[in-house]
Amino acid sequence: MVKFTVGVKRMVRPALIRLKKFLVRIISHYRARIVQIMHILSAALLLSSIAFFFIYEVFYILPNYLDASGCAYKFNWLLLLYLLHNILGNILYCWGTDTSFVALPKDRQQPLATEAHLWHLCTHCNMLVPPRTFHCRVCNCCILKRDHHCNFLANCIGHVNQRYFVALLLHLTLGCAIALIYNVLYLWEQRGAVLSNPNEFVGVCLGFHPLHLTMSREALFNNELNWLIFNCCILKLNAIALMLAGALLIIQLFMISRASCMHAIRDRSYDLGFSFNMRQVLGKRMLWTMLSPMVRSQLPQDGTRWQQPLDNEAKKPA
């Protein structure tokens, strides 16, 4: 038995090694095409999810929960339109904003004599780049203060467009939280018309109910209970989306508060305090940028010069 096992391992291992090499060659050869397909699929998933939840909440949940002719319904409609404007607008700005080093003016692509020792060589681009600028192998260029590459936005998040990414996460979190409140209130009201006690309501929220065991196929598809279970599935997806968007938002705010980024998560050498760190990302208008992605807010620097706490201490009089 032992000899048989050893023989099988000797036969399988070379085959797995050859398969791995074959897959690596395929991926490296069609890498650009694979990345392009992944970007398209990820963006389509994000946009379709946003469209589905907006239509579901506005045209199904709200009319059943609120009076369509009342002020509350109109207020919630405007609130969801505001969130949709910010979500789609920030997605567009994240995707369309070029935060690469080569997007800088030509005169800023060369270091000054006093800054040359701070720049480093990018072996991929074969050129000197400023501090906190790192190469993205997907975008195939150097990104100013590179945070990470986002497949859903088909672009790198860096110095210029991090503001839009943070605003996108904020409004996604708010939208998911408001939708979750709508869905919970709606399901709680519908519970009295379909179920007789809270225990059965919890069972439906978990995606199952004993009544399904005795119902015929026609009754299962025509019964109001089936719609309630569908609503509960949407509620669970809503909760998952809220947790993901909220977690990413917390991570981004934590990184900004430390003046670090996901590419160099432990680097705190540029931490100048929470207010100044936020201004470096959001610009001079700070929180006004959360109202709309079209609000202009000039960044305090162009991404090639970064002030450090030691610079402030050196400037203080003795």
Image (spheres, rainbow, N blue to C red):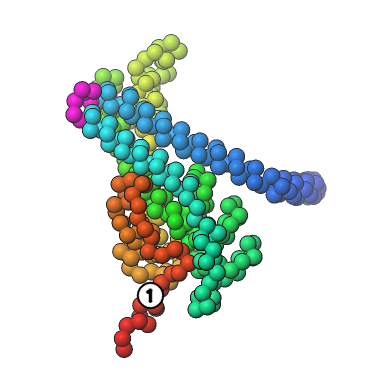
The dominant secondary structure in magenta is loop
Q: Nearer the viewer, residue 78 or 262?
A: 78
Outermost residue, bottom side: 318
Q: Name the residue that disc number 1 marks.
A: 309
Is residue 135 shown left or right of residue 47? right
Q: Residue at x 42, y 50 (%)?
A: 165
Is residue 235 shown left or right of residue 189? right
Query: Residue 78 appears at what percent x and percent y?
Result: 27, 34
Q: Residue at x 64, y 62 (%)?
A: 124
Q: Height in image: 183 above or below 39?
A: above
Q: Residues within 10 Å of mark 1 (few under 14, many from 20)?
A: few
Q: Quadrant of residue 102?
A: bottom right
Q: Height in image: 250 above or below 177?
A: below
Q: Quadrant of residue 63?
A: top left
The mark tally for this picture is 1
Query: Residue 49 appears at what percent x and percent y?
Result: 44, 34
Q: Residue at x 39, y 53 (%)?
A: 163
Q: Nearer the viewer, residue 291 or 220?
A: 291
One can see residue 313 in this view: yes
- Stretch in magenta: 66-72
In reply to whether residue 1 is colored magenta, the answer given is: no
Q: Height in image: 45 above or below 231?
A: below
One can see residue 242 in this view: no
Q: Label 1 sits on what residue type?
A: Pro
In reply to whether residue 70 is colored magenta, the answer given is: yes
Query: Residue 242 appears at what percent x and percent y?
Result: 37, 42
The N terminus - image quarter = top right
Element under disc 1: helix
Query: Residue 318 appears at what percent x and percent y?
Result: 31, 89
Q: Residue at x 52, y 49 (%)?
A: 155
